[in-house]
Image (cartoon, helix red, strand yellow):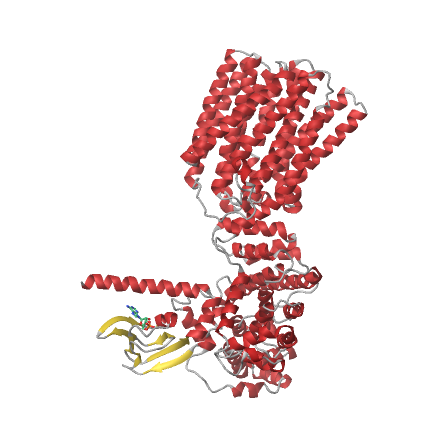
Amino acid sequence: MTLLARWRQLLGIRAEEGRTVGLFFLHNFLLGIGTILVYVSANVILLENHPERNLPLAYLAAAGAMIGAGRIYSRYEHHLGLQRVAVRVLLASLVLTGVLAALVAWGHSAATAVAIMAGYRVIYLLTNLEFWGVSAVVFDVRQGRRLFSVISSGDMPAKALGAVLAILIHHHSDLLWLLLTAFGAYLGALLVLRATGRGHAVEVREAARAARQQAVAPALQRWFGSSRLVLTMCLGMLSIAAVTAGIEYSFFVNVKHRFHDQATVMQYVGSVLVAAYLLALLFKLLFSRAATDQVGVRRMLVLLPGVLAAAMLLAVWLWYAQADEGTRLLYFCGVFVTLEVLRRAVFDPLFLTLFQPLSPPERLQAHTLAKGVYEPLGLGLGGLLLLGQHLRPGLSAWAPFVWMSLFVALAWYCLYRTHGHYLAELQHALRRRFSAGPDTATTLRWAAAADEGGSADPAFDPTNFVPAETSQLIAALRDKTTRPAATQALLQGGPAVVPALAETLESPEADDALVRRVALLCARLPLSASHQALVTLAWQPNLFRREAALRALRGYTPQPSEAPVFEALVQEELTLARHLLTGLTELAPAEPLALSLEYELMRVQQRLFGLLGQLYPPQLIADAQRGVAQAARERQANALEILDNLIPQPVYQALQALLEVAPPAARLRTFERLLTYDEPLAAIVPTVVRRGETVFTDWTIALALGQWQPTAALADAAALLARLGSSSPLVQEAAKALTRRVQQQEPALFGQLLAHQPTLETVLMSHSAPESRISAAERVALLKHTALFAATPENVLSSIVPIMKEVSFGAGEQIFAKGDLGTSLFIVQTGEVGIFSGAQQLATFGPGDFFGELALLDAEPRSASAVTQGPVLAFRLDQDDFYDVMEERPEVLRNILRVLCQRLRRQNEKSVAAG
Ligand SMILES: Nc1ncnc2c1ncn2[C@@H]1O[C@@H]2COP(=O)(O)O[C@H]2[C@H]1O
């Protein structure tokens, strides 16, 4: 690993982000140099001009000027677009610095000092808004959390440098030089901004969102917008700004009292600032990110008010103990440094992250509101109260601590509330505009099925329900003609049918499809017994059954008493994930088995979400699950952020490793940190073959069988026999091929296997007659090559194999005629089929093409005739089966639509060309 890569890893920067982060760091560094030099110049003049009175005045003037500048900024931000506003802000900073330089050259009166201080604050505000505005649209919430502390540390070395200059410079002629250097720094920042603009779209895109469920009261929306997050953050920042003014003032005034000589004052203040900025830099770079990850956003938010509250209590004690001047100065110095470090290293990056879930325009508005209105307002309030104190000289130096304590309490309350609002915003950002939620969808499907009931089969009259028929009713769920009536009858049975349903769920004989149906039925009977039956189902070692249980459990509220069951299952899933990842590291990335194991990992991930939905608020988990599946980076990031705030860190890290697009070895490292094993893990191929259909999909098992080298062990013979007897044609086929290979190439081994399992040979022979010309594996390959299923993984396609009906036609044979009734779709395996409307040939379809989809979709008569052009081998898919597939795999319907559009366009082009 190169030094640069190591450094990047330490700071949590990904390789592709390196350049952008570098540019932002440099930009902030230059801005930092500029602002600190202006700040030093302002302080030099202010501290020699009666700071006790002028500092509060400067705060008040600065607050007014900042609010004005903030308003102008937000107007332009709205009309000009971010990139142009950013450029203008830097140009304005250049002009303002020029004006300040003129003021310094002109004289050093108190008014000049106040004006310079206000000017500094305005420059600081504008550059801040510009910098964070640009970063807030370039980075998403997750990147923000990782990188904001790094990019924002750019101004820390700059500030430390400025503070060193403050120690060295006491002459006014030097101040002009400082301001000229600041001018140069702003110019540099402008150039860096242009470079950033070339690499990124620095613009704000409007994203449509539904109205908030919990918005700010209408009367307050004018002042804070509709988000409660913005409201509490703004008030929190106002309070902290007021306290900061109080502490900065107390610190400066105490220094001034202690050292009367101007040079010593500047040296002292300068040294404290250097220490504060260097500490903040170190803290930001090394601990900020780790602290947010470990401690969590909730606790980080109250850290600053918490520390300030402790400082207030210490002040009470010092006042009570009548501390001397030296101790007091030490105290103010300590509080000042701590506050600066915490504000810059913890609060500022966090503040930015918290606004990331807002839509981009709202985010910028909120930002301008917080920094350009409420923070200056806090400063102004602080200034006012300090001025009041100055006008009543009898008051103790500790007097400001009374109102500061009140502001600390307000900040605590607001920031404490902020975390809840932050989660609500994340959820709001993830919510679909017209989301009906998964449970409603399931319920609707079932309701539709139940509505169809009654007429399908007179044998099951739901009004005439007798409990003794329960087992028959359950059996009737298998057949699609009797299913609707049986469903309705079972639902009407209520508690009386639950024991029989539970028994079916536990029965090893019931097939997976029946278990799925019964599980969904249980979900529609909201009784504790049916809930219990589903929890027991989730606990079964068959993972397909667990998936069915978790899907059915989605509608139930998590029960604390069941948490240990689901927690144990989470651990089990993580163990399987680790095993799969270990297996993946042994395979080439594009190898079919590797791709298949990735699919198994995806199943683990989905089950984990299902389990988490039983442990934490189900709606939040469901939103997060939808969000992580989204292509949009911003939504994904919001979803991860929700999870990070909701679930325990180890589970979160494991889930993130599963979701990441990184080499298996990198993902495995996370799991190795989280889970430890006493024994080495078995190789993946034998594991897949041994655990078989209860854990893995048919496709994975068939691929593993293709690579497996059985040993003479009893377990291997049993596994082989079990796979030969599989109900899946694909697995059976692969097991047979393997057994034959062993029989022919390794007769000794075959003999040993036979000794363990004497029935092996009979099972092998019993399936020897080929039932169809095309093997299950070839069928999967055919499906994969059709436009319809190109995006569907083989693991899913293998479950379509059993519903594919092989059909063959002679040359010139009509498959169906225009106007026929029929609801099947055909996929050509070999040969060609012509589509005719009368004598006109509309199209010709060859291997991999499909036709007949129109009647399948709308159940109207065939729109054209299909006639073979030579011998044809094809597969027929019937409507009911195909609808099941479409329901589970949305991409199949999307692909049908895509192909239909292509056909329509081609037809239009032909019509235009013809006439
Ligand atoms: N213009 C066309 N271009 C391509 N295929 C067509 C066209 N018209 C009809 N078909 C196919 O022919 C099939 C006839 O039966 P369906 O109406 O079920 O579905 C139809 C389509 O699959």
Residue 729 vs 234, above or below: the answer is below
| Residue 463 at x, y percent in the picture | 56, 78
In the picture as drawn, the residue positioned furthest to the left comes out as: 915
Q: Is residue 140 visible?
A: yes
Rendered-image quarter of ligand 1: bottom left
Q: Position of residue 80 (x, y in %)?
A: 41, 34
Q: Quadrant of residue 144?
A: top right
| Residue 476 sits in quarter | bottom right
Residue at 50 percent across and 61 percent down: it is 589
Q: Classify 562 as above or below 748.
A: above
Out of 122 and 657, give the one closest to the viewer. 122
Image height of 380 relative to 842, above or below: above
Could you tell me which residue is drawn at 43 percent across and 29 percent down? 88
At horizontal 60% and vertical 61% (from top left) the residue drawn is 608
For the image, the number of numbered tags is 0
Whether residue 86 can be seen here: no
Q: Residue furthest right?
A: 321
Q: Nearer the viewer, residue 565 or 435?
A: 435
- Residue 195 at x, y = what percent? 43, 36
Nearest the eye: 569 or 660: 569
Q: Quadrant of the C terminus?
A: bottom left
| Lateral position of residue 648 relative to residue 366, left or right | right
Based on the displayed image, in which of its 4 quarters is residue 624 positioned?
A: bottom right
- Residue 292 location in percent, x, y? 63, 44
Horizontally, is 247 left or right of 479 in the view?
A: right
